[in-house]
Image (tube, rainbow, N blue to C red):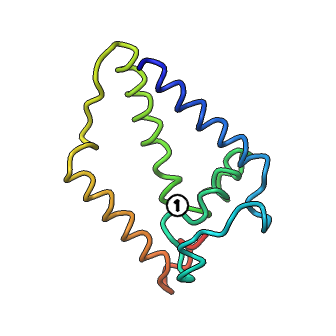
């Protein structure tokens, strides 16, 4: 479906608009992270909404401080979306190393490591 990249981009922009206008820095606007609520520990995604809100308002430093991993993955996601959009426009299938099991295992390992390290006392700078 050639419209799929445009639909995904529209969804991302709509979600960003909502998070930009409904401040996640103020309590009560969004539900608490279930993992944080149940364990008291930060998950790899904790701080993601605050990061998007900060980026939408041009606060790059604050965005990086909210979730470093997700911040660093934005260019990767943009590249993959762009590649997908171009290949779809040309009528080509999306082939990617990301679909290989080894790549998925590395990605899960990075998420788990980040989730563990950001909760250790010496890595308090990684906490949102």
Viewer-closest of 116 and 94: 94
Front residue (pair 50, 3): 3
Q: Which residue is mark 1?
A: 68
Q: Nearer the viewer, residue 127 or 25?
A: 25
Q: Position of residue 20 (x, y in %)?
A: 74, 46
Residue furthest toward the bottom?
Answer: 121
The percent position of residue 60, horizontal first and vertical second, equals: 65, 51
**What residue do we see at 47% from left, 26% from top?**
5
The image quarter containing residue 108 is bottom left
Q: With respect to residue 31, does 63 lie above or below?
A: above
Residue at x 53% of width, y 73% of height: 35
From this view, report whether residue 33 is shown above or below residue 17: below
Local packing at callout 1 (Cα closer than 10 Å; few below 14, some 14-19, many 20+) is many
Q: Is residue 94 left or right of residue 64?
A: left
Q: Position of residue 42 (x, y in %)?
A: 54, 74
Q: Residue at x 42, y 42 (%)?
A: 76
Q: Is residue 100 left or right of residue 75?
A: left
- At x 68%, y 65%, the residue is 31
Q: Is residue 125 above or below residue 77?
A: below
> Is residue 89 or residue 71 the one in the foreground?
89
**What is the quadrant of residue 105 in the picture?**
bottom left
User: In the structure shown, which secondary structural element does the residue marked by tag 1 occupy?
Assistant: helix
């Amino acid at each position: 479906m050639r419209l799929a990249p445009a639909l995904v981009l529209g969804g991302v922009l709509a979600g960003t608009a909502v998070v930009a206008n409904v401040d996640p820095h103020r309590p009560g606007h969004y539900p608490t992270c279930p993992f944080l609520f149940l364990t008291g520990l930060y998950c790899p995604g904790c701080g993601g909404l605050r990061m998007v809100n900060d980026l939408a308002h041009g606060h790059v430093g604050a965005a990086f401080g909210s979730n470093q991993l997700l911040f660093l993955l934005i260019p990767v996601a943009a590249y993959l979306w762009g590649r997908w959009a171009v290949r779809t426009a040309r009528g080509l299938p999306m082939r990617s190393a990301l679909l290989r099991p080894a790549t998925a295992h590395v990605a899960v390992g990075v998420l788990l490591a980040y989730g563990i390290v950001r909760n250790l006392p010496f890595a308090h700078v990684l906490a949102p």
